[in-house]
């Protein structure tokens, strides 16, 4: 399985460097367990890791191709198991409406997805990012926390893009706290938001200033 480990290292290197050209050119395929018989547990672990990163490559490639008309910001992070994931931000700067749609999500090699669907509203000295909904398909993966933990850096990248189009920087993140009780309780969701700097009033209106 030495060749597989070399391939894993190559994939990880392209992901860390955000080598979009290499990602888009990739034609790697998932290897099914039944295609390789009588392998050791160590080799099986390498196969599992390889398949994870092939799935991640495919998802990123599909996402970029699907959203090629949008501005996309890619941030490399690690999940709680140490595997590479992507925090992806898409900005529909050409959308002519009350606000500009901004989508933040995590792409991983797992089946789980986490989305933060937002809208940017421009106001003099007080432009805001409003969270319309924030949802994980499966709980306890830590993906929601990764987005909230890195929110300042994510918004820094968004602000740089907005500046290039002569929009005001985001100074406030707002939203209504609404818990999907199949995923997380309102109490636990409130604790998570507050842990990452949000103020929440008695009506579950959330607010966090961006430094």
Image (cartoon, rainbow, N blue to C red):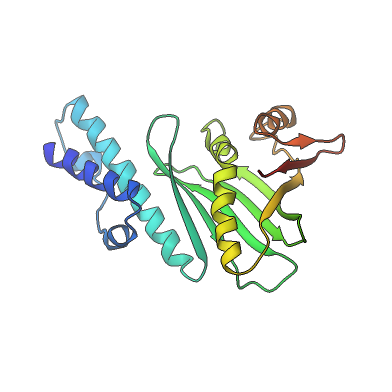
**Which residue occupies the extreme top position in the image?**
41
In the image, taking residue 142 as reference, residue 108 lies left or right, namely left
Instruction: Indicate the quadrant containing the N terminus: top left, top right, bottom left or bottom right.
Output: top left
Q: At which x and y percent is residue 104? A: 57, 51
Q: In front: 202, or 125?
A: 125
Q: At which x and y percent is residue 201? A: 84, 35
Up the image or down, 70 lies above or below 133; here it is: below
Q: In front: 124, or 134?
A: 124
Give me the residue at 55% from left, 37% from top: 138
Give me the residue at 79% from left, 35% from top: 200
Q: In which image quadrant can residue 31 be found?
A: top left
Q: At which x and y percent is residue 210? A: 67, 45
In the image, taking residue 3 as reference, residue 99 lies left or right, namely right
Q: In which image quadrant can residue 147 be found?
A: top right
Q: In which image quadrant can residue 199 be found?
A: top right
Give me the residue at 12% from left, 37% from top: 2
**Which residue occupies the extreme right position in the image?**
202
Q: At which x and y percent is residue 156? A: 57, 50
Give me the residue at 60% from left, 56% from top: 159
Q: In front: 108, or 9?
A: 9
Residue 104 seen in the current view: yes
Instruction: Indicate the quadrant containing the C terminus: top left, top right, bottom left or bottom right.
Output: top right
């Amino acid at each position: 399985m030495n060749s597989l480990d070399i391939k894993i290292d190559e994939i990880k290197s392209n992901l860390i460097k955000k080598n979009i050209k290499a990602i888009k050119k990739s034609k790697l395929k998932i290897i099914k367990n039944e295609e390789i018989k009588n392998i050791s547990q160590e080799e099986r672990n390498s196969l599992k890791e390889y398949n994870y990163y092939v799935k991640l490559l495919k998802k990123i490639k599909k996402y970029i191709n699907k959203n090629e008309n949008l501005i996309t910001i890619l941030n490399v992070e690690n999940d709680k198991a140490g595997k590479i994931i992507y925090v992806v931000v898409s900005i529909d700067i050409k959308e002519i409406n009350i606000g500009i749609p901004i989508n933040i999500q995590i792409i991983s090699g797992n089946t789980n997805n986490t989305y933060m669907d937002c809208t940017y509203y421009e106001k003099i000295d007080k432009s805001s990012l409003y969270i319309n909904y924030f949802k994980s398909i499966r709980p306890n993966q830590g993906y929601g926390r990764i987005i909230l933990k890195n929110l300042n850096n994510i918004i820094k990248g968004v602000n740089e893009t907005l500046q290039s189009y002569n929009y005001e920087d985001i100074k406030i993140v707002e939203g209504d706290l609404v818990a999907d009780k199949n995923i997380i309780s309102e109490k636990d969701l409130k604790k998570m938001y507050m842990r990452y700097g949000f103020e929440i009033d008695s009506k579950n209106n959330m607010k966090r200033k961006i430094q």
